[in-house]
Amino acid sequence: MERRERERGAAGLPSRLKPQADREANAERKIRSLLWRHQPEFVLAGNLDIVFTRSSNTPVSLSQRQGSGTLRLHVLFSKAPDSVLEDVIRFCFTRGNQVEAKNLKARILDYVGENRHQTIATMSEPGPFSPKGKIYDLEKTLRRVIRKYVPERRLVSSRPAIGWSKRPTIKLMGKWIETSPGERNAIIINSLLDDERVPDYYLEYNVYHELLHDLFSIHRSRGRWIRHSAEFQAREKTYPLYTRAREWEINELQSLTMAENAIR
Ligand SMILES: [Zn+2]
């Protein structure tokens, strides 16, 4: 199940690219001046690359080799206040005190947690995408799934938007995107599944899975993000065709993606 959660890389940054580049440059300047203040010997000794990533699994990491290093930060930190950047610098470059490191880490993760909706919305912006495919109309599938299995989303105003991905991908069958409060969340389904060879129960299962993300939002536990909690998984298994859908995925999905590979 993990593979369907992989991010789609940096693909979704349309016209906002420029302001985002400015934000990153600005944050980089701040980090370098903080570094100079806290760790002048590191600045003197070597090279530090600062890279903003869109990987949500590791918000902050530092790799060092022979005096030079790479500091990787989630793009979320490009908007972080100075105090948070200072925590990041102290966390990465201060050696020794474990209690302090633990406190710094907790503060950094709190910042990530508080601003998570903001990042996800900005970074994986789906753009205009349509629910109507060549074979399947996702709007209809969503309505059916809600009617049969997810009464919590019966109110139209509580429903996420849904659409096909612009291009088929190999690994990710669906993705749930959390937006800012007050906006509709979104579900994107891999357009690979808009195919007559795909049984409707498999498509339905994928829509159901993503819709469950709308019910059981991602939370942090022991320092890790939990996407598919025990509750989530138990509810997922109540889908009557769960076993059949998983079997189809194991046995048949591959032939679909192989054909897709051959076309490219
Ligand atoms: Zn999932």
Image (cartoon, rainbow, N blue to C red):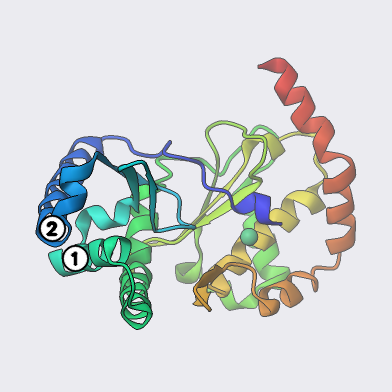
Looking at numbered disc 2 in the image, what kind of residue is underneath it?
Leu
> What x and y, as percent, mark residue 72?
35, 49
Q: Quadrant of the N terminus?
A: bottom right
Locate residue 94: give its quadrant: bottom left
Q: Which residue has dot 1 on it? A: 86
Asked if the residue under mark 1 is in contact with the one under mark 2, i.e. CB atoms within 8 Å, the reply is yes
Label placed on residue 34: 2
Q: Residue 196, labelled with which disc?
A: none
Q: Quadrant of the C terminus?
A: top right
As drawn, is 108 to the left or to the right of 242?
left
Question: Is residue 218 shown to the viewer in this render?
Answer: no
Viewer-proximal residue among 84 and 75: 84
Q: Position of residue 254 (x, y in %)?
A: 81, 36
Which residue is at the far bottom?
99
Residue at the far top: name it.
263
Q: How many angstroms separate mark 2 from mark 1 (CA)?
A: 7 Å
Residue 163 visible somewhere in the drawing: yes
Q: Earlier in the sequence, mark 2 or mark 1?
A: 2
